[in-house]
Image: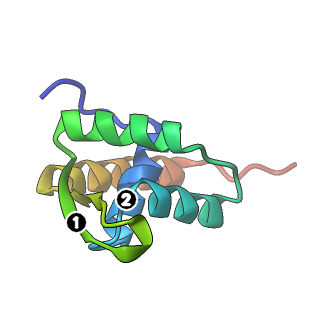
Amino acid sequence: MKGTHLGEFEELVLLTCALLINSAYSVTIGDEIERQTDRSVTLSTVHTALYRLEKKGFVESYMGGTTKDRGGRRKRLYRITAAGFDVLNQAKEMRNRMWDMMPDYKF
């Protein structure tokens, strides 16, 4: 598997895929990230992150069912893999370890 490190945005996308069980596709992922972070997200950045995460084996995509509001077209949905959960836990543990080491600054 090429490249197992997560960038900040990749981590946000991966976390969001884990949160949006059975409804994680590019639009819902972008909307949720915008809601949670109060920052603007473009669909192209979400697509790029999803492509990288799938290539790394952290998410897998599948086609959802057809819907009338999409004119009968299917959505490409994403779900987190076991490797994705592992890498998220590793990132969380590393951050927590470093936060625990943070000196008590007095400003």
Indicate which label's residue lies in the foreground, 1 or 2.
1
Dot 2 amino acid type: Tyr
Side of 88 relative to 2 (left or right)? right
In the displayed structure, 49 sits above or below 76; it is: above
Q: Is mark 2 on a helix, strand or loop?
A: loop
Mark 2 crowdedness (10 Å alpha carbons): few <14, some 14-19, many ≥20: many
Determine which of the numbered discs, if any, sits on residue 25 in the image.
Answer: 2
Q: In this view, does 83 lie above or below 57?
A: below
Whether pointer 1 and pointer 2 mark residues with C-beta atoms closer than 8 Å, the reply is yes
* Residue 42 or residue 52, whichever sits in front: 42
Residue lying farthest to the front in this orientation: 71
Drawn side of residue 64 relative to residue 31, left or right: left
Q: Residue 97 carries which label?
A: none
Q: Name the residue beneath numbered marker 1.
A: 64
Viewer-proximal residue, 32 or 97? 32
Residues under labels 1 and 2: Cα distance? Answer: 10 Å
- The outermost residue toward the top is 2
Residue depicted at 31% across the width and 36% down the height: 51
Could you tell me the amino acid type at mark 1? Answer: Gly
- In x, y percent, where is residue 31? 56, 62
Q: Is residue 97 visible?
A: no
> What residue do we see at 16% from left, 56% from top?
81
Q: Which residue is drawn at 46% across and 59% down?
A: 29
- Give the mark nearest the N terminus, 1 or 2: 2
Horizontal and vertical percent for residue 60?
A: 18, 51
Is residue 1 visible in the rendered image? The answer is: yes
Residue sitting at x 34%, y 54% = 93
